[in-house]
Amino acid sequence: SKARHHKWDVEYVYWKPDCLEGVVIGINGQFPGPTIRAKAGDTVVVELKNKLTTEGVVIHWHGIRQLGTPWADGTAAISQCAINPGQSFEYRFKVDKPGTYFYHGHYGMQRSAGLYGSLIVDAADGDKEPFKYDGEFNFLLSDWWHQSISAQEVGLSSIPFRWIGEPQSILINGRGQYNCSIAAKYMEGMNTCGKMASPQCRPEVLQVLPNKTYRLRIASSTALASLNLAIGGHNMVVVEADGNHVQPFTVTDMDIYSGESYSVLFTTDQNPSSNYWISIGVRGRLPNTQPAIAILNYRPNTPSKIPSSAPPVTPAWNDYAHSKSFSYKIFALNGSPKPPSVSNRRVSLLNTQTKVNGYTKWAINNISLTLPTTPYLGAIKFGLKNVYDEEKPPEGFPEDYDVMHPPANPNSIQGNKVYKFDFMSTVDVILQNANALSGNVSEIHPWHLHGHDFWVLGYGDGRFTDKDVAKFNLKNPPLRNTVVIFPYGWTALRFVADNPGVWAFHCHIEPHLHMGMGVIFAEGVERVGNIPKDALSCGVDATIMTNGTHHP
Ligand code: C2O
Ligand code: CU
């Protein structure tokens, strides 16, 4: 194993993600940021310089558990202080497991401004993943708005509330085409793109040879959109989810929620004289964004040869039965780690859309998350007082809460309490969905846990009850770091609190997190050693980090 060194300058740059010029947060002048490629067991070192001039920055390594390095998790006000303009910070962490990951900004709404990139971990030398392929491709998916994140943010925190709306474009590896399509020929009323205005928005072309098997890695860093991907005429075999191997299963299309990653294998067994479309459309919300299109190019055809059949059509946005059937097919590959058979504690988290002093928010057990000014990691480790609310947050929600209707009392409070778990205890979390503020609305929320993978024990419709425990899948539940709750449903997950640190657990929809849709978990913080001084040089932590001692 070796160290993979990177030097990054983070700054706003002009870019044309969907052929229209805007500004994005680039890394070393690139958008998306450079791909990090490493082998399991390697140490990744990123020396980051913040050249944003008016904003702090941090980067989260999504799916990397940060075993023993909780200060490198890249969550502002949780694991570290935001890196100030002009300052540098060194991220140094181990990647222990092969898989498809990504990284992104985790301060304000910087992920929505384009601060993301791929992180791919190959098997260690001499190790193999349990499947074979002849070549591979990588898709980092995102969604793009023409409105700046500062304007988006103001809208979300105004009365009346102004929603960001649907994205203008879906991007594949940072490339999309606004208001035109390379598959226009097959789409009613759609403009042709003509000559692509800029190489920055040129569609992805996957060059393949007939009768080979390819691995397509897919990760979604979308701010909002739930996506569905299909390759015209080709089946896909799902083999990896969030850096864990799954029992292979075959699909013709697949859903990908924000925060998830997958690998699929496909075989080029179709008529080789044709090219094929890859189509990625929006699901789970009434779409107002055209599908992103890429080309599967069978060599020696030219990439510009228009496929002879239409692009795959994304399933209806509200066909939740279709979405569920995909999620319910995901199981751990035989031989994967199994969950402990019982848990020590169960926390039920009710997801509601609410109001706080007239502002529209999301709340978990009636608390809408706001972060303290001093990062939790130092505050808990050094036992600082008055940094965050040290009362225990609620373990559940009222028995009589009606999840099928808008909240009877829509008012919540803001807070920053922490769920503290006994080190090495087994924790069950029940994520309970509910009706939003307006009637007959319940949305999909992809929940992402930092610092851990968890087992997905089951899903259900309506309100979770004790009887559902008997139906938990303890035999082959998949290990994930992101899982959805479906409208009006619940999702149960289990993890072992074995990673000392403070970990965010939140909806991966950027505006939802910004509106308070998250909680904070912590375990074994007293075991965290040698936090680099730079990580905590802000707020009350700063005095401790510089004095080395704590005078309460
Ligand atoms: Cu990818 Cu806390 O997020
Ligand atoms: Cu959400």
Image (cartoon, grey):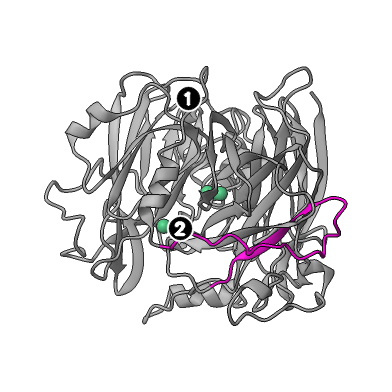
Q: Position of residue 82 (x, y in %)?
A: 62, 54
What residue is drawn where x is 85% and y is 50%? 299
Residue 60 makes an appearance in the image: no
Of pointers 2 and 1, the one earlier in the residue sequence? 1
Indicate which disc residue 551 carries.
none
> In which quadrant of the rendered view does residue 64 lie?
top right
Q: Is residue 299 left or right of residue 215?
A: right
Q: Position of residue 428 (x, y in %)?
A: 33, 32
The C terminus appears in which quarter of the rendering? top left
Quick one: SS at disc 2?
helix
| Range drawn in magenta | 289-317
Which residue is under mark 2? 513
Q: Is residue 323 left or right of residue 296?
A: left
- Which amino acid lies under the numbered mark 2 shown in the image of this protein? Leu
Is disc 2 surrounded by few (<14), some (14 to 19) or many (20+) residues within 10 Å? Answer: many
Disc 2, ligand 1: is the CB inside 8 Å?
yes
Is mark 2 in CB contact (under 8 Å) with mark 1?
Answer: no
- Which amino acid lies under the numbered mark 1 shown in the image of this protein? Asp
The N terminus appears in which quarter of the rendering? top right
Identify the residue at the far left of this view. 400
Work out whether 508 lies above or below 150: above
